């Protein structure tokens, strides 16, 4: 999709630092006009209706907190996003802005179906909260903090609230939110195809925002932070720009961004997101807890360590084990081999990225895992006969490259396979592997009509057992990429079995074949071995 960037100056008032704040009479939030505007949004209204059905299972007159996934569902359908400041942030706010913001929160009443504005609070335990509101949302530092709970209840009336950290990746542990999950949700679900205005102060660097790649157009306007508190004058100066866009991202100080988001929504009918510092991605966070330990007879503890032994197909003349330390990189699933950066980490193959011996991180359906390893071969491999790459398992869709030359693509996370290798006469080679696994966001195998061929027949069916991106109850953590017994390069003899077709015949059919008579029905065949 075409994309352009444009910067705007907001006039001399916003290009200087103001030492004093002008006294003005703030306008009250026009909820009636705003409510009428947003009730016309059918997709948003239908989602609110569904969420209201969920609410009936809980206790009335309490605080409900939607998890990150539900928050993005609301944003994708056009809801605005205004974050409640923390106790520390609120103490530093300018008094006029603070009073006006708290008054707006009270007027909204904590119900996002009014005006299409979802007030976002730090998630915290509260009376009547239901588990389906918060799967995977308890991985950050503020969960269960009694001071946070007290602050939320004091400042916000009972109602339904979005997740305040839904747009801040750095607060989440890797086991709950994958490295690029927030970034990709915003890019694909919220910004896709829209005309966007980014209003930013010194909180963010607009040049480093790849999430904009799916937007139709992007305009940027800078605001000096001390001047941003003059909300009414700021909005008057922005009126021309707001009439040309469909979405406004506000990277402004806490409280100011929330107030501007609500005013933009009510006055102009434009979706506005209070995104703070736009911290959509982060470096890998803290690793998972140490693995289980066993107690030796003497009382000392030692870690339980899994030993990996590659399965060796019978008949190989020699092999090169490729298990061990590889370079790895987690990217968006839209990134190609040529677009990879040099930001590589280390991983121990064949342990999956989700495991402790891997990266100890969740991998989302919108992400791909890239493996890279440099191979050093002696000259004898150049004179070798038939060479193949044997892979015991790679989950789910895995593409292989040797010196950037495609070797093949395999789909299936449980079955071993092999790929033919070209003649190798170089002593140094790069083997690169791309793994992508949508898990429960992909196409589960089904033979019961209606079969969703329009969505699945081109991408393929995916048997996945009990793997899930949101493991709970009997569902397990998903596995992506190389796992099980790993992989190796094999030299085969010049004469070897390439594959085997097995025909299953009944006793009657076998007798007919031995007597030279034709078999009336098609033979049932099972194919064993062969390439991917």
Image (cartoon, rainbow, N blue to C red):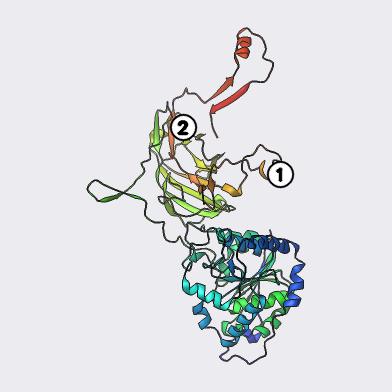
Residue, disc 2: 387
Which of the 4 image quadrants contains residue 227?
A: bottom right
Which of the 4 image quadrants contains residue 508?
A: top right
CA separation, marks 1 and 2?
39 Å
In the image, residue 133 above or below residue 472:
below
For label 2, count other residues whose C-alpha is less than 10 Å away and answer few (under 14), some (14-19) or many (20+).
many
Q: Quadrant of the C terminus?
A: top right
Q: In which quarter of the image is the N terminus?
A: bottom right
Between residue 159 and residue 436, name the one nearer to us: 159
Query: Does residue 15 appear in this view?
Result: no
Q: Position of residue 220 (x, y in %)?
A: 64, 73
Q: Looking at the image, is mark 1 or mark 2 nearer the viewer?
A: 1
Q: In this view, does 288 lie to the left or right of 160?
A: left
Q: What element carries label 2?
A: strand
Q: What element carries label 1?
A: helix
Check the image and name the residue furthest to the left: 298
Query: Does residue 83 appear in this view?
Result: yes
Task: Give me the residue at 38% from left, 37% from top.
Answer: 309
Residue, disc 1: 454
Q: Counting residues from the N terminus, which is met first, the one under dot 1 or under dot 2?
A: 2
For label 1, count other residues whose C-alpha is less than 10 Å away and answer few (under 14), some (14-19) or many (20+).
few
In the image, residue 245 above or below residue 470:
below
State the mark number for residue 324. Answer: none
Q: Where is residue 453 in the image (x, y as percent from the top left)?
A: 70, 41
Between residue 456 and residue 133, name the one nearer to us: 133
Q: Where is residue 263 in the image (x, y as percent from the top left)?
A: 68, 78
Q: Position of residue 473 (x, y in %)?
A: 51, 50
Between residue 515 and residue 207, name the one nearer to us: 515
Task: Give me the residue at 44% from left, 37% from top.
Answer: 425
Between residue 429 and residue 162, name the one nearer to us: 162
């Amino acid at each position: 999709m075409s994309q352009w960037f444009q910067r705007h100056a907001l006039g001399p008032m916003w290009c200087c630092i103001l030492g004093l704040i002008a006294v003005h009479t703030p306008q009250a939030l026009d909820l009636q006009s705003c409510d009428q505007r947003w009730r016309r949004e059918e997709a948003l209204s239908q989602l609110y209706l569904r969420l209201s059905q969920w609410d009936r299972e809980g206790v009335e007159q309490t605080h409900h907190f939607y998890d990150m996934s539900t928050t993005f569902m609301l944003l994708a359908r056009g809801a605005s996003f205004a974050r409640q400041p923390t106790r520390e942030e609120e103490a530093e706010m300018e008094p006029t802005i603070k009073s006006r913001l708290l008054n707006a929160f009270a007027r909204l009443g904590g119900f996002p179906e009014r005006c299409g504005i979802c007030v976002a609070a730090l998630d915290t335990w509260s009376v009547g909260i239901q588990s389906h509101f918060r799967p995977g949302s308890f991985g950050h530092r503020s969960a269960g903090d009694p001071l946070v709970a007290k602050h939320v209840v004091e400042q916000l009336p009972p109602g339904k609230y979005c997740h305040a950290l839904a747009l801040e990746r750095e607060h989440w542990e890797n086991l709950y939110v994958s490295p690029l999950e927030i970034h990709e949700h915003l890019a694909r679900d919220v910004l896709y195809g829209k005309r966007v205005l980014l209003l930013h102060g010194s909180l963010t660097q607009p040049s480093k925002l790849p999430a904009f790649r799916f937007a139709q157009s992007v305009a940027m306007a800078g605001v000096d932070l001390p001047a941003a508190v003059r909300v009414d004058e700021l909005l008057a100066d922005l009126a021309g720009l707001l009439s040309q866009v469909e979405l406004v991202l506000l990277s402004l100080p806490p409280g100011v961004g929330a107030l501007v988001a609500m005013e933009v929504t009510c006055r102009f009918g434009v979706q506005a997101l209070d995104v703070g510092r736009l911290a959509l991605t982060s470096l890998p966070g803290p690793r998972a807890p140490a693995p289980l330990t066993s107690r030796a007879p003497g009382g000392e503890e030692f870690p339980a360590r899994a030993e990996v032994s590659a399965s060796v197909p019978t008949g190989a003349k020699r092999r090169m084990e490729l298990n061990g330390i590889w370079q790895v990189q987690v990217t968006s699933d839209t990134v190609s081999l040529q677009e990879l950066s040099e930001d590589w980490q280390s991983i121990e193959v064949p342990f999956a990225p989700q495991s402790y011996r891997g990266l100890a991180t969740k991998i989302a359906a919108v992400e791909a895992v890239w493996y890279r390893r440099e191979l050093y071969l002696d000259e004898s491999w150049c004179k070798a006969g038939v060479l193949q790459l044997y892979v015991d398992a790679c989950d789910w869709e895995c593409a292989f490259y040797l010196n950037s030359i495609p070797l093949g693509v395999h789909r299936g996370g449980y079955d071993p396979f092999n790929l033919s290798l070209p003649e190798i006469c170089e002593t140094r080679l790069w083997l690169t592997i791309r793994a992508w696994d949508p898990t429960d966001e992909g196409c589960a195998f089904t033979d019961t009509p209606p079969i969703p061929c329009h969505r699945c027949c081109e991408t393929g069916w995916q048997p996945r057992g009990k793997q899930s991106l949101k493991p709970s109850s009997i569902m397990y953590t998903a596995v992506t990429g190389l796992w099980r017994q790993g992989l190796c390069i094999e030299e085969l003899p010049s004469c070897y079995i390439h594959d085997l077709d097995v025909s299953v015949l009944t006793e009657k059919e076998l007798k007919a074949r031995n007597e030279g008579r034709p078999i009336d029905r098609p033979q049932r065949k099972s194919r064993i071995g062969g390439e991917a």
